[in-house]
């Protein structure tokens, strides 16, 4: 049986909670300062579009042919080329991470190139300890190399070999800027922090300080208690969400193509699920230290690793893909990326919204259940 | 003096390991992360869906489609029949990439002309898209050179590509050394910052301060348990990396552990500094978080430090994780020696000295 909610009591409780939030510099830091800092980090610090990689070049062959090839590397906008005299020198630089790859033109390069029926090899070494950069190095060197081959063929009056070329088109994000998909995703991380981390501490704190007993002895009902913890943090989260979107769109110029109303709806559902998780941990663990650690592991790290905002879910093994279906952040990331870049694509948004609603009611319901048990 | 510090350390460790709940929270997540993240945190593209809209019906385009379906990156091949279907496949994220063959494709290839193939990608996942595009490009160019071979023309030159330190370009080799750094830092920071804040919130810090212990001794008593936790957790990840993930450990263990202790000192410095300006556990935890978040993101784990703007690279110098990841990877994969690592070791020392003395000063000021 659910006791009727007294709005006077609820308002008083909410007021107390709101004062506590506003008075504490740390919650303001988390809700308003950190989001902006993080957006800038995601916007400028995390750049997956490798620009100008440092590579080394060893010209063991100094023939005009070898120099022509070297020109194609120097001319590439993707490389900053350092020339070395000996291999050992550049190998050292690769080990120390000063260059991410190097190209060796062997002594007999021009000679083999001239001999018909023979193939002149070029050696490309990339630093495998940075796999993403290593594959960029390989791609760009082979791009420069095939450009050089074509040019060489046409200068010699040969018909260049037929080549099937690909014309890539990135929909929603024509310049393929990683910022445009990282920022919408990163807002999810920020919302998780506000929702789960902040609330994981609040109920545990009341227990630790003994104020929970005092509350339980008062006529406050379970619903009122829960609502008084949910509503103020919900308001904080929504304000922060719109702050993030505002900074992303107005300052960082990330296009937003969806509707604000849908954003508010989906955002509310996601906040409900992460607030619910935070409160649940706090209610069950009753200790700020453990609750905070648990929130870090149950909400924050999965949101970073398994939500698909940075790491592609489809590339994970099936078992882990299965796990991601249980993580609310996954649905919010999809919804945010769609809202920002594709607009209101309803099937995607609808299914995300439905899951978030289910997760939210599950966590909040469970919290309510656990609260009752403690009160009896 | 040493016995006093020792008592304090024992007390701190007892606090950390007091009950089942607290012990679990220190150990279980490490195993969970070790099992999940190496598979999850990858920028590779595998098991994706490639869609083909084939307006051509010749042999050549069908041959290419077969090759796409055999690639490891694409486990599913979707056939589309109209522009509207292409739009729907991308909009609803059914496919990462749609390859569109023009009507004259096979005829052009057979006649030795150079036809164009269109690739439509989901810009919401532009990084994976670019990688998938690379695979498609590779398949098409291999097909092209095989056709050349059939006509018995040898290419005058060829590229021989080698990946050092990670011959198969396996992402797990990059992730696990980074994971050693990330997991140790989360707990080293949380343990130092929260234990001081908890004492302050519960009033037991005052009791400690009126005891014969000096602030310096109290600090040491807080730092050493944090280092122990960090080293134990780091060891678990290291063992997992070597024995479960079978990544060959190339370098010196002594150097790795030496720098791990130095790194933990730098972190403990930050932890104490944060707790010295915080009044409650909530503030300390959120403070740690506000430090940890940018530190992880700018550590070179998610995206290379080289790709950041230059001013941010300079600013990132104060981030101990950035230096430690270079050290762990260097020792683990590249067998780098002490001298080669000096450029990354001395910043850790400088950071540790600065943060620890700042924290010490803050504590004394609060007392006075």
Image (cartoon, rainbow, N blue to C red):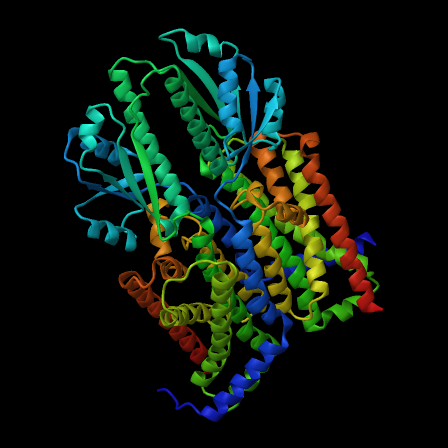
Quick check: A145 left or right of B122?
A: right
Quick check: B134 left or right of A25?
A: left
Quarter in which the C terminus of chain A is drawn: bottom left
Quarter in which the N terminus of chain A is drawn: bottom left
Q: Is residue A357 above or below residue A12?
A: above
* Residue beneath the point at 40% across and 6% down: A115
Q: Is residue A373 above or below residue B146?
A: below
Residue nearest the observer in this picture, B47 or A144: A144
Q: How many marks?
A: 0
User: Do we see residue B27 in this rendering?
Assistant: no
Name the residue furthest left: B57
Q: Position of residue B211 (x, y in %)?
A: 82, 66
Q: Position of residue B303 (x, y in %)?
A: 52, 45
Q: Position of residue B186 (x, y in %)?
A: 59, 54
Residue nearest the observer in this picture, B14 or B207: B207
Residue nearest the observer in this picture, B121 or B326: B121
* Residue beneath the point at 40% across and 74% down: A364
Residue nearest the observer in this picture, A333 or B277: A333
Q: Is residue B152 above or below residue A17?
A: above
Q: Is residue B93 above or below residue B97?
A: below
User: Do we see residue B367 in this rendering?
Assistant: yes
Q: Position of residue A307 (x, y in %)?
A: 41, 55
């Amino acid at each position: 049986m659910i006791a009727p909610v007294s709005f006077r009591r609820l308002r008083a409780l909410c007021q107390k909670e709101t004062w506590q939030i506003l008075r504490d510099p740390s919650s303001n830091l988390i809700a308003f300062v950190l989001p902006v800092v993080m957006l800038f980090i995601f916007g400028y610090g995390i750049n997956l579009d490798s620009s100008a990689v440092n590579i080394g070049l060893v010209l063991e062959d100094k023939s005009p042919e070898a120099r022509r090839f070297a020109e194609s590397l120097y001319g590439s906008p993707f490389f900053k080329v350092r020339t070395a005299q000996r291999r050992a020198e550049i190998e050292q630089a690769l080990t120390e991470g000063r260059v991410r790859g190097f190209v060796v033109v062997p002594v007999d390069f021009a000679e083999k190139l001239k001999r018909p029926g023979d193939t002149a090899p070029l050696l490309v070494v990339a630093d495998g300890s940075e796999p993403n950069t290593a594959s960029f190095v390989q791609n760009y060197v082979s791009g420069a190399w095939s450009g050089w081959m074509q040019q060489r063929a046409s200068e010699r009056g040969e018909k260049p070999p037929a080549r099937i070329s690909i014309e890539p088109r990135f929909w929603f994000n024509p310049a393929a800027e990683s910022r445009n998909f990282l920022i919408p995703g990163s807002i999810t991380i920020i919302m998780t922090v506000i929702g789960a981390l902040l609330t994981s501490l609040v109920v545990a704190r009341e227990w630790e300080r003994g104020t929970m007993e005092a509350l339980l002895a008062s006529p406050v009902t379970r619903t009122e208690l829960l609502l008084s913890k949910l509503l103020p943090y919900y308001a904080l989260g929504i304000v922060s969400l719109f702050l993030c979107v505002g900074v992303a769109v107005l300052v960082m110029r990330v296009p937003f193509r969806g509707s604000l109303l849908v954003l508010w709806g989906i955002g509310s559902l996601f906040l409900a699920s992460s607030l619910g998780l935070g409160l649940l941990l706090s209610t069950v663990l009753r200790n700020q230290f453990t609750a905070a650690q648990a929130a870090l592991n149950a909400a924050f790290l999965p949101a970073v690793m398994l939500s698909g905002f940075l790491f592609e879910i489809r590339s994970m093994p099936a078992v882990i893909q299965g796990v991601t279906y249980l993580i609310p952040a996954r649905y919010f990331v999809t919804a945010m990326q769609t809202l920002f870049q594709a607009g209101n694509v309803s099937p995607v948004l609808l299914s995300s919204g439905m899951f978030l609603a289910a997760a939210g009611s599950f966590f909040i319901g469970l919290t309510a259940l656990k609260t009752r048990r403690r009160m009896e | 003096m040493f016995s006093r510090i020792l008592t304090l350390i024992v007390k701190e460790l007892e606090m950390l390991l007091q009950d089942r709940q607290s012990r679990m929270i220190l150990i279980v997540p490490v195993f969970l992360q070790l099992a999940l993240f190496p598979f999850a945190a990858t920028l590779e593209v595998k098991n994706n869906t490639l869609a083909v809209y084939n307006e051509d019906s010749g042999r050549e385009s069908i041959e290419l489609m077969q090759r796409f379906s055999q690639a490891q990156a694409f486990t599913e091949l979707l056939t589309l029949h109209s522009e509207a279907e292409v739009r729907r496949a991308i909009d609803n994220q059914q496919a990462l990439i749609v390859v569109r063959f023009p009507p004259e494709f096979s005829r052009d290839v057979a006649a030795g002309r150079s036809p164009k193939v269109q690739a439509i990608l989901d810009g919401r996942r532009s990084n994976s898209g670019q990688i998938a595009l690379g695979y498609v490009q590779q398949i098409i160019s291999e097909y092209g050179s095989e056709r050349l071979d059939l006509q018995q023309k040898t290419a005058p030159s060829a590229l021989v590509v080698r990946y050092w330190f990670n011959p198969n370009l396996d992402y797990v080799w990059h992730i696990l050394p980074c994971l050693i750094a990330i997991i140790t830092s989360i707990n080293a920071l949380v343990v130092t910052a929260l234990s001081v804040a908890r004492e302050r919130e519960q009033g037991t810090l005052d009791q400690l301060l009126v005891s014969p212990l000096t602030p310096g001794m109290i600090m040491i008593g807080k730092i050493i348990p944090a280092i122990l936790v960090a080293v134990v957790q780091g060891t678990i990840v290291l063992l997992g990396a070597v024995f479960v993930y079978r990544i060959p450990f190339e370098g010196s263990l002594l150097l790795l552990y030496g720098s791990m202790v130095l790194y933990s000192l730098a972190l403990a410095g930050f932890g104490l500094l944060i707790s010295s300006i915080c009044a409650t556990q909530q503030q300390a935890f959120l403070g740690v978080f506000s430090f940890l978040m940018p530190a992880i993101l700018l550590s070179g784990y998610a995206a290379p430090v080289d790709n950041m703007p230059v001013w941010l690279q300079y600013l990132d110098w104060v981030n101990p994780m950035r230096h430690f990841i270079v050290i762990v990877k260097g020792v683990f994969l590249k067998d780098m020696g002490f001298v080669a690592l000096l450029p990354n070791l001395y910043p850790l020392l400088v950071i540790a000295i600065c943060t620890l003395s700042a924290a010490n000063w803050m504590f004394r000021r609060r007392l006075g």
